[in-house]
Amino acid sequence: MNRSLVDRIADAVLYEGYILYPYRPSVKNRSRWTFGSLYPETYCQATGGSDAASNQTECLVRGTLATVFDARVRFLHLTARSLGAVDPPLAEWPDSALPPSRAVETLRVGDQLFHEWQEAEEREVVLGAATLGELSAGARSRAFAFPGVRRWELLRGAAGEVVGVLIRRQQSLEGVIEVGAAEVEAGLFRLRVRVLNRTPCEHIQAQSRDLAALRCLASTHAILTVRDGAFVSLLDPPDCWRAAAAACHNIGTWPVLVGEDGQHDTMLAAPIILYDYPQVAPESPGDFFDATEIDEMLTLRIRTLTDQEKGAMAAVDQRARALLARTEGLAPEQMLGLHGTIRGLGPPPQEHAHEELGP
């Protein structure tokens, strides 16, 4: 497995829809647009809505009872960011204590603007290696939990006085990964991986979807690997296993082969539709976090933002700031590379020769 190549694709999936153009607080960006978000099970049961609490991946593996399987489940843990204005400013205040403040949506400190917003922290849970023999004998499960935290950052003026506070709150998360295997024919196994959000959600009827989102597993996906075995493409399986591939039941995931073209030891269970061996275009200067992103169009749009709009974009978070700096620093040849390219162009079709008929 080419770990760096696989992780680059997985990271693109992880941040798909993390923040969309116009990359600043607006009606469009009040809620996350990430795919594959798993909400607390109790919330989904109580609301009866369309939000999912779990996903399921089924795929095929060529191997033996000794073939080793492992998985990494990755998702974003959302963080609520709020602001408080300290009025009047405090000349002396320890960093370890939360000062009295009044809630505000935005706060300017010198030349820097701060916004009430959401951030996200990457999470990863490793299932642990197991043989197909062990998984065929009985399903395994791995529980995981991430505690809730509250952190704050004092915002100081030019003279060092405390003029505001940036507060980050993260709700606790709980979940479980279940995995099992079954031999469908000699040398061919069907793997099943389920991820469930078991986070408690008290006073569920009073919870809004935005509050429940802080307890979701956002952009959930899994990286599956085998040793001494090989995954079978579900998009283009051998004819002899086409029926077995069609029988795989995937809910909220789309498993594809990843890595170097032709490798079969790694599969990405993505929350979006991909093809086998997806790649990030080498011309792309970096992430735009935008579903079905079109790099040139988004680059040109960012460059047309006003200084005020760019300031609001920079205030969103470090990823938005990095995107803005990267876009404004593109060299002319990099911009030209975004204009378009042709890949995989084969020879033109040959015209059929006309045979002359004899007398």
Image (spheres, rainbow, N blue to C red):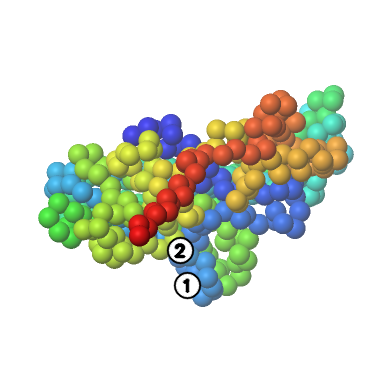
Which residue is the extreme one toward the front? 359
The kind of residue on which mark 2 rests is: Ala
Crowding at mark 1 (Cα within 10 Å: few <14, some 14-19, many 20+): few
Give coordinates of residue 276: x percent, y percent: 40, 47
Image side of residue 244 versus residue 165, left or right? left
Image side of residue 306 versus residue 93, left or right? right
Question: Is 226 placed above or below 137 here?
Answer: above
Labelled pair 2, 1 in contact (Cβ < 8 Å): yes
Residue 33 or residue 246, whichever sits in front? 246
Q: Which residue is mark 1?
A: 45
Image side of residue 8 versus residue 181, left or right? right
The kind of residue on which mark 1 rests is: Gln
Give coordinates of residue 237: x percent, y percent: 29, 54
Give coordinates of residue 74: x percent, y percent: 44, 46
Q: Secondary structure at mark 1?
A: helix
Residue located at (39% from left, 50% from top):
256
Q: Which residue is mark 2?
A: 53
Residue located at (69% from left, 40% from top):
296
Identify the image quadrant of the C terminus. Answer: bottom left
Identify the image quadrant of the N terminus. Answer: top left
Mark toward the viewer: 2 or 1: 2
Residue located at (85% from left, 31% from top):
110
**Nearer-N-terminus badge (2/1):** 1
- The answer to whether residue 178 of the structure is visible from this angle is no
Q: Quadrant of residue 253?
A: bottom left
Residue located at (62% from left, 54% from top):
32
Residue 358 or residue 351, whichever sits in front? 358
Give coordinates of residue 103: x percent, y percent: 78, 50
- The answer to whether residue 62 of the structure is visible from this angle is yes
